[in-house]
Image (tube, helix red, strand yellow):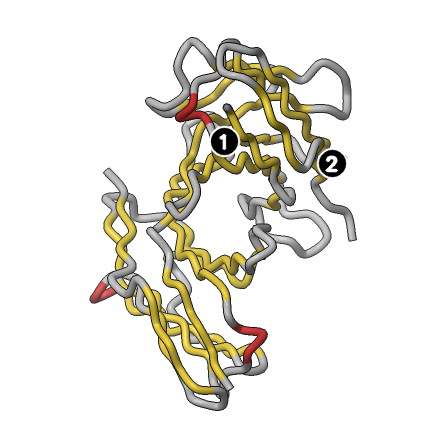
Amino acid sequence: AQKVTQAQTEISVVEKEDVTLDCVYETRDTTYYLFWYKQPPSGELVFLIRRNSFDEQNEISGRYSWNFQKSTSSFNFTITASQVVDSAVYFCALSLILTGGGNKLTFGTGTQLKVEL
Amino acid sequence: EPEVTQTPSHQVTQMGQEVILRCVPISNHLYFYWYRQILGQKVEFLVSFYNNEISEKSEIFDDQFSVERPDGSNFTLKIRSTKLEDSAMYFCASSEALRISGRAPYEQYFGPGTRLTVT
């Protein structure tokens, strides 16, 4: 069975602080994908990043960076110099490839990030 | 940039009524999905659909739910007799089967969601 754990329910930071959102996953599959999505107050799901299980390179995109460590089954997300606009719920998700093709996402419970002035 | 669209954005219905939620996936995508998010909770997989049939469904997706691709563009979720606990945000998503235009396979693109309120 697949499982994604986001132990941090809510994090509050002051603008310009760095913040790391944790994600730990469980799967028996050797091929899988990991995702991060942002859900702002308006409710839509905004794709941030996808990482496959064979690519452990860390990635940086502007103020965002991701640290994938297969040895600890973690895929953590860091926002550098946080801004008020970063306030949202962030979901980590694990993809199971379906037998017939396509995939199914298992989401974590999300971390509510509040960035204050 | 192509996107997944969903209508309506908000649907209010009375318990026991049937509702149909509509989605237009990205045109060259072959896999279609519905997810549900009860307010304040995580996003949960409901069903995946490929080649005009369900390829996977969750325990939530019971006999009250059905999906259909009535034409070449729409993908619908029907709830036959709504219950109070069906109140949630419903997200449609679609994905490609092959690596096209530099995009990775299996990346799901989500619509903006339909908020269903059952009273």
State which chain disc 1 sits on. A
SS under mark 2? loop
Image location (x, y in percent) of residue A78 = 41, 77
Q: Residue A90 is drawn in which quadrant?
A: bottom left
Image location (x, y in percent) of residue A65 = 46, 77
The answer to whether residue B70 is left or right of residue A60 is right
Q: Residues within 10 Å of mark 1 (few under 14, many from 20)?
A: some
Residue B13 sits above or below residue A30 on the image: above
State which chain disc 2 sits on. B
Which residue is depicted at the point 37% across and 43% down?
A106
- The residue nearer to you, when weighing A45 against B98, is A45
Q: Which residue is mark 1?
A: A101
Q: Which residue is mark 2?
A: B28
Image location (x, y in percent) of residue A100 = 47, 25
Image location (x, y in percent) of residue A34 = 41, 55
Residue B30 sits above or below residue B53 on the image: below
Distance CA(mark 2)–CA(mark 1): 15 Å
What's the residue type where badge 2 is placed?
Asn
SS under mark 1? loop
Which residue is depicted at the point 54% across and 82% down?
A83
